[in-house]
Amino acid sequence: MWKPILNAPFGRDLELAVLDEDGAHALVFPCQRVGEGWKNVTTGARVDIRPTHWRDWVMEKTLNEDDGLQPGR
């Protein structure tokens, strides 16, 4: 279940949702919330995004598992 980004925890691998002109999308890599924003867990690089929702990252994801991605609920 997606949760509002305002209560995203620090130091945990998270799946993030972002909005763009095509709608809501889940990022395909895990991110962690850090003091200055977000970082890609895989590369350690800072990620310049403004996510709207989050959920715990699950390693065994299937393709097309955006089901339930409806920010604003």
Image: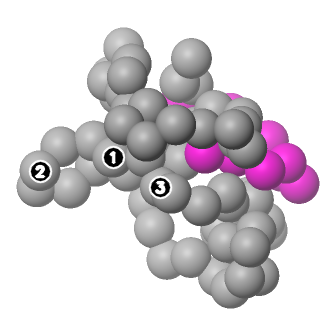
Instruction: Tell me if label 1 and label 2 are in contact, CB under 8 Å.
Output: yes
Query: SS class of the residue under badge 1?
Result: strand
Q: Which residue is mark 3?
A: 27
Lower position in the chain sequence, tag 3 or tag 2: 2
Q: Quadrant of residue 72?
A: top left
| Magenta stretch, residue numbers | 4-15
Kindly identify the residue that appears in the image at 43 percent across and 42 percent down.
63
Drawn side of residue 8 relative to residue 12, left or right: left
Determine the CA span between mark 1 and mark 3: 6 Å
Q: Which residue is mark 2?
A: 22
- Residue sitting at the far right: 11
Spot occupied by residue 1 in the image (x, y as percentages of width and height): 56, 17
| Vertical order, 22 against 60 (above or below) | below
Drawn side of residue 58 relative to residue 26, left or right: right
| Vertical order, 5 against 36 (above or below) | above
Inspect the image, locate mark 3, and give the three-letter code of the amino acid beneath it. Leu
Q: Is residue 36 visible?
A: no
Q: Is residue 6 magenta?
A: yes
Kindly identify the residue that appears in the image at 72 percent across and 82 percent down.
43
Inspect the image, locate mark 2, and give the three-letter code of the amino acid beneath it. Asp
Spot occupied by residue 60 in the image (x, y as percentages of width and height): 69, 38
Spot occupied by residue 53 in the image (x, y as percentages of width and height): 50, 37
Q: Quadrant of residue 46?
A: bottom right
Instruction: Tell me if label 1 and label 3 are in contact, CB under 8 Å.
Output: yes
Drawn side of residue 26 relative to residue 33, left or right: left
Q: Residues within 10 Å of mark 1 (few under 14, many from 20)?
A: some
| Vertical order, 44 against 22 (above or below) | below
Inspect the image, locate mark 1, and give the three-letter code of the amino acid beneath it. His
Spot occupied by residue 10 in the image (x, y as percentages of width and height): 83, 51
Query: SS class of the residue under badge 2?
Result: loop
Q: Which numbered tag is attached to residue 25? A: 1
